[in-house]
Image (cartoon, helix red, strand yellow):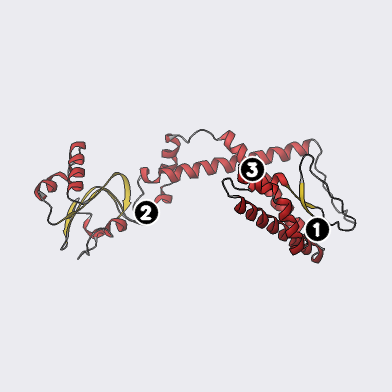
Amino acid sequence: MKGLSQSLRNISGVLLALVSVSLLVSCKWHGSVTEYVYGKTPIVEIGTDVLYMEDLKQVLPLGLSDADSTLFAERYIRNWAQDVLFYQNAIRNIPDTKDIDRLVENYRRSLIEHEYQRRLIEQKFSSEITEEEIEQFFNDNQRLFVLDESLLKGLYLKIPVKSHDLSEIRKLYTLLDDESFEEIEKYSIRNAGRCEFFYDNWRSVAELEVLLPPLDDPLESQLEDNSSFEFKDEEYIYLLNVSQYAPKGGIEPLDHARGRIRGLLLNNNEVAYMRNIKEDLYDAALEKGRITFYQKKTE
């Protein structure tokens, strides 16, 4: 706090230097009236723009030395003044700001409407979409869930060729019990291998094929007839066990589509909800005579 208080005591000196360099004097534009903030201490004033001591205190970092605090304050004041002067110059050179004002008002209106809609939806749809709704939508709209890539679930192992007890791991990697998983994981760690269990989530075949050595036949073409694979190069043995396979062009598995379906249902509900609110507001305004229609009389 010593650096902070010392730097603030030195601000008056900083301002004197800035006045001589940047002509940051307290000046008034003709016809302008400065509205000061009650309880704050002005330190720089340009036209009707004022920088206050309290604002500078808020941005002044703690823990700076006296010299660094003074340097920071000087730079901040100079940057503030340059921004104000540039803006004031822009205003004088672009007197017609009707288009800008219209854009600003449209943007402000959009922000307010978006925030109001967010709050309405948050209050209305705080609960999750039910599993029954997800399954019903999936069954009724399967044309939306045709796979554009093949998926699989399973286990991937990459083990150095020189690893011990390879015969044991070959027996374990096709088993699906917890005890086997634990032994496989330990084996992988001991032998500096790579082990990925994805029995509970789908992976694309293309993603898995990248982890394998170059193959004579694409992995895709081998999945229909096999569930366990072993590949090899000069350094590693690659083991892949496939527990489930969903081919390209087939229907996407529900557990893979579930998250997207939930998003679709939430979006549909939100759109319908907001449409109803707007229609209710419109009907109520019509009933109360708040909307006036002007029609040109036809002769």
- Left or right, 281 with reference to 240: right
What's the CA distance linking mark 3 and mark 2? 37 Å
Q: Nearer the viewer, residue 272 or 8?
A: 8
* Image coords of residue 107 (percent x, y): 69, 52
First in sequence: mark 3 vs mark 2 = 3
Q: Which residue appears at 66% of the width and 55% of the height?
A: 76
First in sequence: mark 2 vs mark 1 = 1
Question: Badge 3: few (under 14), some or many (20 or more) residues near its Cα, within 10 Å?
Answer: few
Q: Which residue appears at 32% of the width and 48% of the height?
A: 202
* Image coords of residue 134 (percent x, y): 43, 39
First in sequence: mark 1 vs mark 3 = 1
Q: Are marks 2 and 1 in contact (CB under 8 Å)?
A: no
Question: Badge 1: few (under 14), some or many (20 or more) residues near its Cα, within 10 Å?
Answer: some
- Tell which tag, 1 or 3, sits nearer the viewer: 1
What kind of element bears circle 2? Answer: loop
What's the CA distance linking mark 2 and mark 1? 69 Å
Q: Nearer the viewer, residue 79 or 135?
A: 79
Disc 3 marks a residue whose amino acid type is Glu
Residue 174 against residue 15 in the figure, above or below: above
Q: Nearer the viewer, residue 85 or 207?
A: 85
Task: Indicate the quadrant where residue 58 lies.
Answer: top right
Q: Are marks 3 and 2 in contact (CB under 8 Å)?
A: no
Q: Is residue 84 visible?
A: no
Residue of label 1: 25
Disc 2 marks a residue whose amino acid type is Leu
Residue of label 2: 147
Disc 1 marks a residue whose amino acid type is Val
What kind of element bears circle 1? Answer: loop
As drawn, the label of residue 115 is 3
- Tell which tag, 2 or 1, sits nearer the viewer: 1
What's the CA distance linking mark 1 and mark 3? 41 Å
